[in-house]
Amino acid sequence: MPRALPFPIVLSLLLVVPPAAGESSFSETHRAAARGTVTIHNPDGAVVVRGWTRDQVSVAGVIEDERHTFLRFEVTGDEAEVAIEGEELSFMQRVFLGDGPSAARLEVWVPRGSRVTVNSRSAHIGVAGVTGALTLASSHGVVEVTGAPARVVASTVSGAIRFAGRTEDLTARSVSGSVEAEGVGRRLVAATVSGSIRGAGENLQQVEMQSVSGALEFAGSVRAGGRLEAQTTSGDVDLVLPPDLEAAYRLSTARGRIENGFGPPPRREDAGLGLRFGRLGARVSASTGSGELALLAPPEGHAARQ
C-alpha cells in the first residue's frame, strides 16, 4: 500500500506564449476596484490569472482564429468581465469551423484582493497571487492555484485540481481528475468518482474526502472538536497523523486490511474488519469497501507541512 506522506507540489503555471502563424494577439487595460469582482469566460485554450498591487485589470493574449472570435472586456462599477466570444455562424460555417469561438490563451492581471471567477469548457486554468475568493471551473482542463486566496472552489470533469499555498477553505470536486491540496488551514472538502485525493494541512476543523474508486490520502492534523472523514468504495485510504492526537478513531474495511501504526489491532466484524479506539477530542473516521486502510505516524523529523 502506498504511504501518504507530506508531499511537495510543483505548480507549473501556464504561460501565454507569443502568437504563432495565423494567430492574433491583443492587450487591453482598464481601471478596476481594488476588491471588486472579476469574471473570466474562455471556452478553450488557457487562462492565467495573476494578482498585482495596481487598481487595474489588464488582459493580454492570443486568439487562434480572429475571423469569428473576439475579446469582450467590460468594467462596470466594481465588476469586470473578460470573455472570449464567437460570432453567430451559419450551418456550413459550423460544419467547417466547429461550434463556438476559437481557442484563446489569456493572461489576466487583477488587483490581488479581487474575487475571481473563471469558467471554461476545456481551458487550463492557473491562478497565482490573488488573496480574494476564487471560483474556478473547467470541464476538461487542469486547475492550478498557488498563493493565499481567502477561499477556493474548484471543479472539473476530467482535469486535475492542484493547490499549494495557504487558504482557510478549499472545496474541490472532479469526476475522473485527481485532487491535490497542500496548505489548507481550516476546511478541506474534496470529492471525486475515480480520481485520487491527496490533502495536507495542520490543525483543520473539517476534512471530508470522498471517492468511489479513487485512493484517499491525508497528512496533517485535526483540531480538538474537529472531524476527519475519508470514505471510498474500492480505493485505499492512508492517514498520516500525529500519534499524540487526541481523537476518537473509527476505521473499517469490508474486504481489505487495516494497518494501525498507533497500537491496537483491528477486529473481525460482521461487515469485515473494524477498529475503534481513542477518546473524545477530534473525530477521525475512515472506511473503504475493498481497499486497504492505514493509520500511520509521520516519519521522525517529517511533520506534515503547513
Image (tube, grey):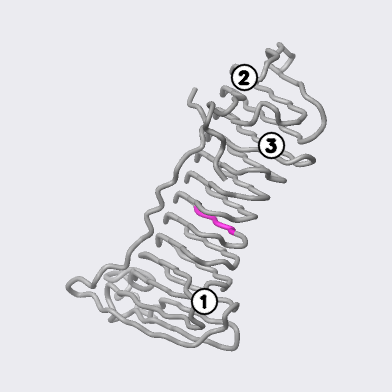
In this view, 188 is above or below 55: above
The residue depicted at 41 percent of the width and 85 percent of the height is 29
- Residue 7: percent from the left, percent from the top? 47, 39
For disc 1, the marked residue is 111
Q: Amino acid at mark 2?
A: Gly
Alpha-carbon span between mark 1 and mark 2? 47 Å
- Residue 194: percent from the left, percent from the top? 51, 39
Q: Amino acid at mark 1?
A: Pro
The residue depicted at 59 percent of the width and 68 percent of the height is 132
The residue depicted at 68 percent of the width and 23 percent of the height is 252
Asked if the residues shown at circle 3 and circle 2 are in contact, with their CB atoms under 8 angstroms apart, the answer is no
Left or right: where 101 falls relative to 196: left
Quadrant of the rendered structure where residue 72 is?
Answer: bottom left
Q: Name the magenta segment's main secondary structure.
A: strand
- Residue 34: percent from the left, percent from the top? 57, 80
- The residue sitting at the front extreme is 301
For disc 3, the marked residue is 229
Left or right: where 61 falls relative to 243: left
For the record, the magenta segment spans: 152-156
For disc 2, the marked residue is 261
- Residue 226: percent from the left, percent from the top? 75, 41
Report crowding for label 1: few under 14, some 14 to 19, many 20 or more residues within 10 A (C-alpha): many
Report crowding for label 3: few under 14, some 14 to 19, many 20 or more residues within 10 A (C-alpha): some
Q: Foreground residue, 144 or 7? A: 7
In this view, 233 is above or below 101: above
Return the disc, 3 or 2, that comes first in the chain's sequence.
3
Return the disc, 1 or 2, that comes first in the chain's sequence.
1
